[in-house]
Image (spheres, coloured by chain):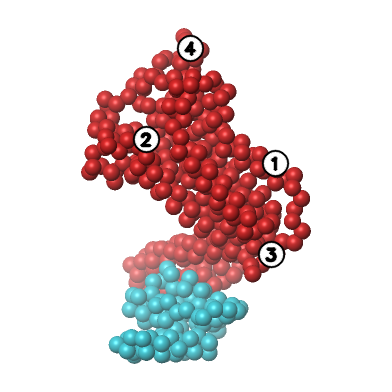
Amino acid sequence: MRKPGDRLRALAALVSRAATMERLIDPVIADMQYEYADASRRGQVWRRAWVRIAGALAFWRVIGSFAVERSLDNVHEWAAADGWVMGRTLGGSTLVTVVVTFSVALMTLMLGPTAQFRDGDTVRMLFYLVPSAIPIALPAGLLVGIVYGLRRRAATSRAQRAISLIAVCCTLAAFAWVDRVVPEANQAFRVVASGIPSNQLLKGANELTFGELAQKIAESDGSSRGSARELSGTLRAPAGVLRFWYHARLAISIAPLIAGLFALRLAAAGRRRLTLVIGVVAMTIYVAYYIAYDFTWLIASNHWGPVAVTGIAWIPNLVFLLGIVLLKARPPEAATSTQSA
Amino acid sequence: MPRRHDRIPTLPPKETLILQLLVREKEMYGLELVAASRRRLKRGTVYVTLGRMEKKGYVTSRLEDAPPSGGGLPRRLYEATAFGRRVLAAWDQVAARLVPELAR
């Protein structure tokens, strides 16, 4: 005859190791069965029902608590492996990403036409600039974080795989973020800055999703005549400017992966102090490239063609790719210590 | 198997309470600990805490000798180890020095 908790125990046995069953699951089930038998002996029908419910709740709480504790242990072990390579990489990347995000947002606010802005909205404008700054800061954070994380450490194949996977995840997240969140934030920023309600404000080139930008480029090229309806509620912009925004946002989305691979190559190249210096310099140039120049004005005034515009958008990634190729061609440094000094 | 002690042992409040109860009574079941704690320990988390303490080497456990009369699974009895007692004593001393009001 089945006793209370037998089904739960069988369920847990499917996914738990013997030690977990012995130390966590079995004691909970044993308590439930002991209390149930005791209530049955005394003829306490209501208590028997309560023991079943309380026992089942205790069982699921044990499973939940153990899962959380185990996950935290696994994360800790993962971060601590290979001399804390992953912990240092993630910590360094996060710190640099946060610092660069707020620096970029602040610089954009200060370099922009602040005279037009109403004083009371500065904090809100800064808040709406942060989403645009994150995708720019992410590759910079990864670049410095990886070089710092692998400094004085051996880049084991496990660490390299984990770092590459993180870079891929960052790229996918950046793509979704740039497509969905950044356009909304950019328009919210312009609403606050101009004081015009959003329903009266036409969308600018940097306030469109990838799909909307592609449609606008097709409209501007005149190639969509008869095949696509004209996108309403958007500002007219030169095809070059639209193409630049389209490619710049694509390039920024892919940048975490390329910067991550570049940083892995750089860290493996040896010369520990020099690699960190190169990483920081590369990060600074990369960030400066995207915030220091008004490419929109440059492209609109020079009427550059599609190849030049696309090239401008992809230059940082192309430079990183060139760096990867050059570092790959370079012979690895002979002595690489695996431990910190 | 107790973990190798490569760092200063820590004693969070729930572990302190369990050690205090186990030092007072020699051996206790999980449910007895829950009942004796006056609701400060929960039946859903006490075994996770006890498992962690066993890994740290603060407590040891064994299955009860005679199977329960109802024919269910044998229950597990917990006992404080000598190391657990030492950690508790040291913890109490430190607490008493730092915050005399907390001294038992």
- Three-letter amino acid code of the residue under disc 4: Gly
Cα–Cα span, label 2 and label 3 = 45 Å
Q: Position of residue B90 (x, y in %)?
A: 45, 89
Q: Is residue A327 left or right of residue A254?
A: right
What residue sits right under mark 2 in the picture?
A186
- Measured in 3D between alpha carbons, the distance from the residue under mark 1 to the one under mark 3, in whole angstroms, is 25 Å
**Do the residues marked 2 and 3 share a common chain?**
yes
- Frontmost of labels 4 and 1 is 1
* Mark closer to the chain start, 4 or 1: 4
- The answer to which of marks 2 and 1 sits earlier in the sequence is 2
Q: Amino acid at mark 3?
A: Thr
> What's the colour of chain B in the image?
cyan
User: In percent of the image, x 48 and y 86: which residue is there?
Assistant: B87
Secondary element under disc 4, as helix, strand or loop, is loop
**Where does label 3 land, which residue?**
A338
Mark 2 and mark 3 residues within 8 Å of each other at the beta carbon: no
Residue depicted at x 67% and y 43%: A324
Q: Residue shown at 51%/70% (left/top)?
A: A24
Quarter of the image that includes the C terminus of chain B: bottom left
At 29% from the left and 87% from the top, the residue drawn is B101
Q: Classify mark 1: helix, strand or loop.
A: helix
Estimate the x, y position of residue A45 in percent, counting from the top left.
35, 68
Label ID, residue A222: 4
